[in-house]
Image (tube, coloured by chain):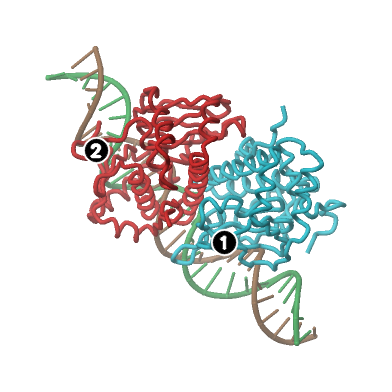
Chain colours: A cyan, B red, C green, D brown
Amino acid sequence: MPIPGLQPEHAPSGGSALIAKLETVAPLPDEDRETLAALGENAREMGARRNIIREGERPDHVHLIVEGWAARYKLLPDGARQITAFLIPGDFCDLHITILREMDHSIATLTRAKVAYIPRDRMETLSARPGIARALWWATLVDEAVLRSWIVNIGRRDAYEAIGHLMCELYVRMKNVGLTHDHSYELPLTQEEVGDALGITPVHVNRVLQRMRSEGLISFARGALTIHDYQALENASGFNPNYLHIDQRV
Amino acid sequence: MPIPGLQPEHAPSGGSALIAKLETVAPLPDEDRETLAALGENAREMGARRNIIREGERPDHVHLIVEGWAARYKLLPDGARQITAFLIPGDFCDLHITILREMDHSIATLTRAKVAYIPRDRMETLSARPGIARALWWATLVDEAVLRSWIVNIGRRDAYEAIGHLMCELYVRMKNVGLTHDHSYELPLTQEEVGDALGITPVHVNRVLQRMRSEGLISFARGALTIHDYQALENASGFNPNYLHIDQRV
DNA sequence: CGCAGTAACTAACATATGTTAGGTATGGTG
DNA sequence: CACCATACCTAACATATGTTAGTTACTGCG
């Protein structure tokens, strides 16, 4: 499945995507890094398109994506699906579920994935470390900012801009956990999944992708995306990475 | 401006909407209630359509809506506006801004409003109370759930369903802070603002409202909404209040 | 009381996107 | 190597919503 030459030489493993992500806020002491790295050690392997957790459930532990992709989604009565977030390595599925008690949406893997199950008491240990606690707060708030950005994307951009914007966002997020190579990254989404995230039909996603390819903007096949002119894609889609709050360092 | 007969006899004032909202999670001790009530005491009066805070700013205090309505929004290069949230009494504007440092969107009043400015040290005092801290967490997570719900609304529902869904959501939220009267509440939005929240044009909002009126579903004029058949509106829009996490009590 | 600004409303027409119904490539599997 | 499932791709046509360009109704204010 991995595209030859696309994966970085030493792909992050275990909890290292999480560490890279949380260190966006500030470098962490070795002790914290070790604690985080240990989280990924006995993660479970899951097949593609399996539910990690479903609407209405009340889990007593937290799920962390260690490897692979997943998506939050909601189903409508008529069977339509809306994806509300893509989860990549280092992302938590349900960090604060104990406060809300019950999931109001479902989460499923999109690819084969490694998912860590973190018991509640272990989460409390984590939160007791000030550096980690602050970084987890930051991650939660960035998730919220991404949701707002998606609302703008779906509400006010046409399909061409919206798809471009999504590609830029995922590029920046993947880069931030060390999973890009130049301007390429594994983007294991079907055209239907892209449509379900953007509120458009797969037929229309296909039309837009054809156009982007014919313009030489991108290559996208077999689960991998290459952006040939990143600046042009940013401009065409009105992408501004400020909402990801990555440049925290002063 | 208030509609005669629509306001409850004793309209909540000061921080009482906030108290009502936070007590959704669990009753608070009198001491906590007094602390919260005091927050609203010296709130500032603001005119309609004034910015409370703008994208890029780094405030050193937190804003709380005590009275009136406000909206989060983002502007696109072409001047289009997308509203990502409506804020009603009891809602915080920027509860955790110190962690992200910089606003990634703007917030403006929609009506005349009272806005409390809460200094950072006072917020820390608040967070030191376990009951309040937990309730603030809950409020943050519900905000996030509402964002997900809006994504579904904008992405997968047609204009008729989306407008109905928004009316249901605001009904439940207003009711939860004691600002409804039967199935009526003050909804001081222009048709353009509704469109900016749902990603549609004011012309189309108007078409849909005409239809809803002609069906006898609602009355909506002069900033007040009456839902004549709430159950029908819920059904027509696929509204399910579970994502507001209001039924927390066991 | 008349004016000006804003919001509501409407009609005629344009179009981005949806729908339906396929065909074609690809990859895993027995 | 044939088969099957899945994803990709395409064309023809349908429609929800957008666009433009107004008119009409309020409301606050001088």
Q: Judge whether residue A228 can be spotted in this image.
A: no
- Locate residue A133: give its quadrant: top right
Q: Read off the chain for label 2.
A: B
In the depicted view, which residue is nearer to us: A83 or B66?
B66
Image quarter of the N terminus of chain B = top left
Q: Is residue A154 above or below residue A74?
A: above
Q: Which mark is residue B7?
A: 2
Separation of residues labelled 1 and 2 (CA atoms): 49 Å
Q: Amino acid at mark 2?
A: Gln
- Which residue is at 31% across, 56% downward? B233
Name the image quarter holding the C terminus of chain B: bottom left
Residue drawn at (35%, 51%), measured in percent from left and top?
B168
The front one of B126 and B192 is B126
- Looking at the picture, tell me which residue is in the foreground, A196 or C17: A196
Look at discs 1 and 2 and give the one toward the viewer. Answer: 2
Residue C16 image offset from top left, x and y in percent = 51, 50
Which residue sits at x=66%, y=59%?
Answer: A189
Instruction: Tell me: residue B69, above or below residue B244.
Output: above
Residue under label 1, please give it.
A203
Instruction: Tell whether B187 sits left or right of B129.
Output: left
Q: Is residue B187 visible?
A: yes
The kind of secondary structure element at disc 2 is loop
Q: Chain of mark 1?
A: A
Camera-side residue: A63 or A113?
A: A63
Rate crowding at label 2 as few (under 14), some (14 to 19) or many (20 or more) other CA atoms within 10 Å: some
Q: Amino acid at mark 1?
A: Val
* Image coords of residue B184 (percent x, y): 26, 46
Same-chain status of marks 1 and 2: no
Q: Please count the marks in the image.
A: 2
| Mark seen at residue B214 | none
Label 1: state its secondary structure. helix
